[in-house]
Image (cartoon, rainbow, N blue to C red):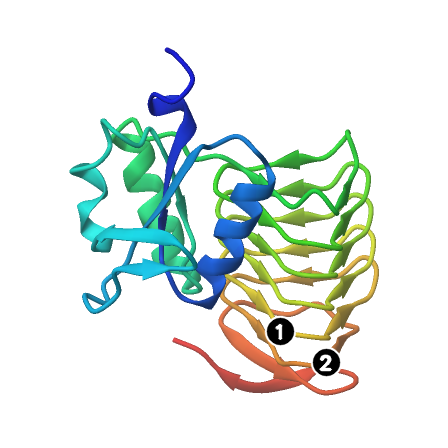
């Protein structure tokens, strides 16, 4: 397959603020000579010089032209659902990594994960599919982040931390070493997690305490 054919074209699902950052990272990686958006806002026709060619559900229409696709949607469960559906339909889902990151060669990163500027992932950590590792966050050694986790800007995660699927670690929070955070947990902004956290709760504070249960 020649340069300029399917191998060099990518569609990004979601043209909001997160999608705009994702598109810039894709451009900086110099792997695609055509980048387009799909978004359900039908009033959008172009975002930051990138064309909006259809809605989110149109990815199957374009899969023969754009072999690569990336889901840039903040909703953790929806993001992972779309990734899995596209993979079943033969669409390649890359890992997007900003050039100004530090990632150990001994880490494993899942498809559909984006790693943004200034982020650090240290040795023997495992990052699942469809994760967001946001700007200037750090993940220390031997951590496991399951599928669909969002690590917000300025988050610091100590060594040997396990974070369950779909959890959202909000901006500026921290998790000390050897902690397990359950599935579908929200860690509020600025919190410090010092104890294990069960599934389906929101926690907040320093130290972080359970504030409410989530469905």
Q: Residue at x 54, y 51 (%)?
A: 24
Q: Which residue is mark 1?
A: 170
Q: Residues within 10 Å of mark 1 (few under 14, many from 20)?
A: many
Of marks 2 and 1, the one in the foreground = 1
The image shows residue 3 at horizontal and vertical percentages of 43, 17
The answer to the question of whether label 2 and label 1 lie on touching residues, with beta carbons closer than 8 A, is yes
Q: In the image, is 25 to the left or to the right of 195?
A: left
Q: Which mark is residue 191?
A: 2
Question: Dividing the picture into quarters, in which one does residue 39 lie?
Answer: bottom left
Q: Residue at x 66, y 74 (%)?
A: 171
Q: Residue at x 25, y 60 (%)?
A: 45
Looking at the picture, does residue 136 appear above or below residue 32? Answer: below
The image shows residue 23 at horizontal and vertical percentages of 48, 50
Q: Marks 2 and 1, how far apart in space?
A: 8 Å
Helix or strand or loop: what does disc 1 sit on? Answer: loop
Looking at the picture, does residue 208 appear above or below residue 17? Answer: below
């Amino acid at each position: 397959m020649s340069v300029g054919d399917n191998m060099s074209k990518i569609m990004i699902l979601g043209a909001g603020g997160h999608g705009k950052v994702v598109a810039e990272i894709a451009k900086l990686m110099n792997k695609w000579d055509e980048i387009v958006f799909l978004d359900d806002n039908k009033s959008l026709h172009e975002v930051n010089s990138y064309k909006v060619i259809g809605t989110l559900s149109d990815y199957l229409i374009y899969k023969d032209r754009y072999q690569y696709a990336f889901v840039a949607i903040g909703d953790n469960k929806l993001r992972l659902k779309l990734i899995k559906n596209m993979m079943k339909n033969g669409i390649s889902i890359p890992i997007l990594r900003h050039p100004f990151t530090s990632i150990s060669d001994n880490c494993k990163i899942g498809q559909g994960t984006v790693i943004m500027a200034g982020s650090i992932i240290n040795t023997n950590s495992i990052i699942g599919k469809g994760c967001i590792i946001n700007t200037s966050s750090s993940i220390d050694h031997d951590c496991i982040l399951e599928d669909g986790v969002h690590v917000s800007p300025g988050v610091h995660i100590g060594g040997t931390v396990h974070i369950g699927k779909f959890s959202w670690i909000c901006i500026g929070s921290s998790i000390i070493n050897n902690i397990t955070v359950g599935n579908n947990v929200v860690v509020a902004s600025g919190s410090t997690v010092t104890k294990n956290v069960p599934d389906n709760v929101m926690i907040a504070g320093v130290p972080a305490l359970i504030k409410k249960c989530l469905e």
